[in-house]
Image: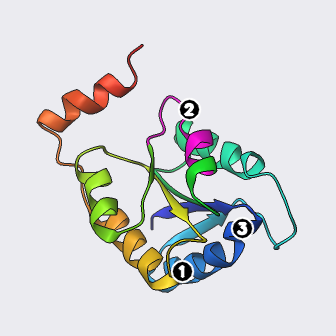
Amino acid sequence: MTTILIGSDHAGFEMKETLKAYLLESGYEVKDFGTYSQDSVDYPDYAHPLAKAINDGETEMGILVCGSGQGVCMTANKYANVRAALVWSAEIAGLTREHNNANVLCIPGRFISAEVAKECVKMFLTTSFAGGRHQVRVAKISEQ
């Protein structure tokens, strides 16, 4: 069974809880990196541990949620083996997997509905990386 890592700050807490339930109902195992309430917290405190776990190969996929999705996305992309993608539609979620081999989905909890977020998660987790010409481009992401 595939384990999906999930985390959020206070602004993404409700969405994280909704997505966690959706993942469990869909047959995934879930490891929750917090936060565990709507009390104000700093998003890097939750994005860093999740991104490090992905970077270190603990599992292949993660989901992060904050108000805009930007903060957790920027934090997660500090890690060499993480390709975090901010999405707001299922189509974009699919393309980030197909073309960019994204492994962390970042959701703007204050800007999309729970139903759209679920559609994004489903598309993200069920779309495969196309490889081919996209592999060359993805390899260039890590070059400096």
Task: Check disc 2 and report the residue beneath it.
Answer: 79
- Mark 2 or mark 3: which comes first in sequence? 3
Provide residue 110's location: percent of width, then percent of height: 60, 71
Specify whether 40 is left or right of 4: right
Q: Could you tell me which residue is drawn at 48 percent across and 73 percent down?
A: 28
Separation of marks 1 and 3 at Cα, in angstroms = 22 Å
Amino acid carrying mark 1 in the image: Leu
Q: Could you tell me which residue is drawn at 32 percent across and 45 percent down?
A: 101
Provide residue 95's location: percent of width, then percent of height: 26, 55
**Badge 3 element:** helix
Q: Magenta span covers which residues?
A: 72-83
Residue 74: quarter of image: top right
Residue 17: quarter of image: bottom right
Queried whether the magenta region covers residue 77, the answer comes back as yes
Q: Viewer-nearest of labels 1 and 3?
A: 3
Q: Viewer-nearest of labels 1 and 2?
A: 2
Q: Local crowd at mark 3 within 10 Å, few (<14), some, or many (≥20)?
A: many
Task: Check disc 1 and report the residue beneath it.
Answer: 24
Task: Check disc 3 and report the residue beneath it.
Answer: 11
Specify whether 53 is left or right of 1: right
Q: Residue furthest left?
A: 132
Colour convention of the picture: rainbow
**Badge 2 element:** loop
Disc 2, disc 3: CB below 8 Å?
no
